[in-house]
Amino acid sequence: MTIETGRFNPNFTLRHQGIEGCARAFYNLTEPDLISHALRRGEGELGIGGTLLVNTGKFTGRSPKDKHVVVSPTTEDNVWWERNRRMDRASFDVLHADMLAHAKGRDLYVQDLYGGADLEYRIKVRIVSELTWHNLFIRHLLIRPDRAELDSFVADFTIINLPSFFADPVRHGCRTETVIAIDFDRKLLLIAGTEYAGENKKGVFTILNYLLPDRDVMPMHCSANHAPGDPVDTAIFFGLSGTGKTTLSADPNRTLIGDDEHGWCSSGIFNFEGGCYAKTIHLSPETEPEIYAATYKFSTVIENMVYDEQTKELDFADDRLTVNMRSAYPMHYISNASQSGLAGHPKHIVMLTCDAFGVMPPIARLTPAQAMYHFLSGFTSKAAGTERGVTEPEPTFSTCFGAPFLPRRPEVYGKLLRDKIATYGATCWLVNTGWTGGAHGQGQRMPIAATRALLTAALNGSLSTQTFRKDPNFGFEVPVTVPGVDAALLDPRSTWADPVAYDRAARKLVDMFADNFGQFLPHIDSDVREVLIS
């Protein structure tokens, strides 16, 4: 018989969900107990300030090619099958049964949490973890109910994560021994064969990204902040990992709403999460003081970082384990974080790209049609380590700046963005945090100080008063001069030692844009056709 510990709804136990035979079930343990259990189980080490130092082993990033969705009458016509692998119901059922059999005799850790800060649209999620530190991680990253709410908590969706279970591709209908499989009808997500904790939160994103469009809510892979004391003055930042999304939204002069995923509904925007999952490579107290400080606060999960074995001092420059080293911590560890996770309609929409070609300017102003074009294009460079097999910046088009998390076709999200901009208005910007003076390997990374200065000017309105030029390659508007920013940065061609080489790189990138956008031509309106890059 399973020994149950913690606070939970007695009418909604693991047994009620068909999960039987585990040795002990620990429900909704708080941070001190989770750390104590993790240390006792040898899952990590205690770091400075009471952090938990962990290593994810073989996988230090997401496994998007191992993500599967169960095919059913409700999903057949609603899922973007070009990016989501099919799994039949019978295979999913076998996988589910085998994972439950694997869990027998083991200790399991359970967290009952919310996804979404808006009471009208949030979902209740139960996460069942084999690893204690995964439970601590997701407790940080999602929204924690009041303790009294746990007494009647019944989950809408359940995630079961067993890293020590390895799938059989033949038996389970998957690609490899690593599998992330979701059945939207049964409201169940299974994760196996990977210790990378990010799969837990990305799973919740996938669920919300599937459900919310049916309610006229746009789910967005973006960070967000607002002016101090003024949640109406809101900005959102689209961008994949490594583009600066977390760093730039954590501006000490603005209030952080959230750093990774939000919804845009009729009343404004809302955060999906209750915490942050920040990259720590080259983190410093000078450039990112709040995020840096969080790496030394109690219960922060420090993932895949090299540290001194005796002093436990973190090495922010040593990337021998991965460049995708991370810290996970609750939102309130950021001093200027929003307490509600809610804000008004965005006044500014910022699309972050990491241009490894060194072609794009550091900032450009977009028309609504251009915003739609660049949103669907989602051009960036995959940061090294964020996905398996990516070892250096790799130019890519990630539709809607979040293709790995989109269960529906991109046009669904693109049209929602277009409609929201048309209804509520917003100024749209494209910001390049990638390279200047040459491509990756020859040029230099865009100075973060310049990026911050340009964004500050954009968000406070002063940038719109400057003189702009039309970019000859992409057609968007680029400021000619901005106070406090080297004018040469605003003209990328001038930063190259060989302007002819710049022209060749620009032509190559323009052609890549045109080739990629061909897939959307049957689905776009005339205003977007008018701004096509060719």
Image (cartoon, rainbow, N blue to C red):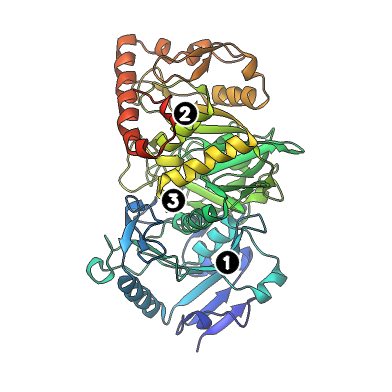
> Which residue: 29% across, 23% down?
508
| Of callouts 2 and 3, the N-terminal one | 3
Measuring from the top left, give residue 354's x and y in whole percent: 43, 31
Residue behind mark 1:
34
Measuring from the top left, give residue 197's x and y in whole percent: 46, 57
Q: Quadrant of residue 11?
A: bottom right
Describe residue 199's horizontal placement relative to residue 440 as left or right.
Answer: right
- Mark 2 vs 3: CB contact within 8 A: no
Residue at mark 2 to residue at mark 1: CA–CA distance: 53 Å
Q: How many other residues sit within 10 Å of disc 1, few (<14), some (14-19) or many (≥20)? A: many
| Of callouts 3 and 1, the N-terminal one | 1
Choose between 246 and 52: the one closer to the eye: 246
Describe residue 91's horizontal placement relative to residue 359 as left or right.
Answer: left
Residue behind mark 2:
527
Q: Amino acid at mark 2?
A: Asp
Q: Secondary structure at mark 2?
A: helix
